[in-house]
Amino acid sequence: MPFLSERPVLLRSLYALLAVFIVLLDQWTKLLVLDRIPLHDSVTVIPGFFNLTHVQNTGAAFGFFASISSPVKTFLLNVVALAIFAFVATFSLRTPATAWLLQSALALTLGGAAGNLIDRLRVGSVTDFLHFYIRDFHWWSFNIADSAITVGVCVLAWELWRTPEPTEAAGAEKEDDHVA
């Protein structure tokens, strides 16, 4: 992609569009659930495996802190979400735009974080509805934003793991190559 690699602003715009797409898809699907499935009701999609189940999560990921009833819980969750959003956005801007897989992972994470943050700021909870299960094992309900965050964080971890950090010795060898 030489055309795009010479235009970092265009590349960053594409990553921003990916994040916006995730937010819009997430919010649209949540509105459909809010409109069509009463709270705590389920619609069977694949019997014995997958339902659409309307749940309002007042806690963090996987329902952590949901049972805590404190007036500051939502405020603290919003502050943490905003801090993570700011960290990921800053990391994205400090990473080369040409690192497309890393930037795509960051865009997925940002879009997902924004989608859930919109819910928290708007109604104080997050609408979850994707419910997978096998027999008596039920996974926590989640949403498009959670999926984007999970995929983004997994790809980010993979990219950071597989991309070696430059070392001083490697930098010195490159300098020697230029001198010779």
Image (cartoon, rainbow, N blue to C red):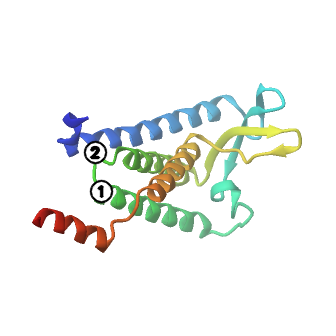
Q: Report the residue at 70% width, 44% height from top.
A: 141
Residues 86 and 42: in front is 86
- Quarter of the picture containing the C terminus is bottom left
Q: Position of residue 147 (x, y in %)?
A: 58, 43
User: Tag 1: residue type?
Assistant: Leu
Residues 119 and 21: in front is 21
Circle 1 sits in a helix, a strand or a loop, which is it? helix
Does residue 6 appear to the left or right of 20 in the view shown? left
Instruction: Examine the rendered structure and indicate whether residue 24 appears above or below residue 167.
Output: above
Instruction: Examine the rendered structure and indicate whether residue 171 appears above or below residue 60.
Output: below
- Quarter of the picture containing the N terminus is top left
Q: Which residue is mark 2?
A: 12
Q: Earlier in the sequence, mark 1 or mark 2?
A: 2
- Decide: marks 1, 2 in contact (CB < 8 A)? yes
Q: Position of residue 103 (x, y in %)?
A: 37, 48
Residue 26 is marked as none
Residue 93 is marked as 1
User: Tag 2: residue type?
Assistant: Arg
Does residue 39 appear to the left or right of 164 in the view shown? right
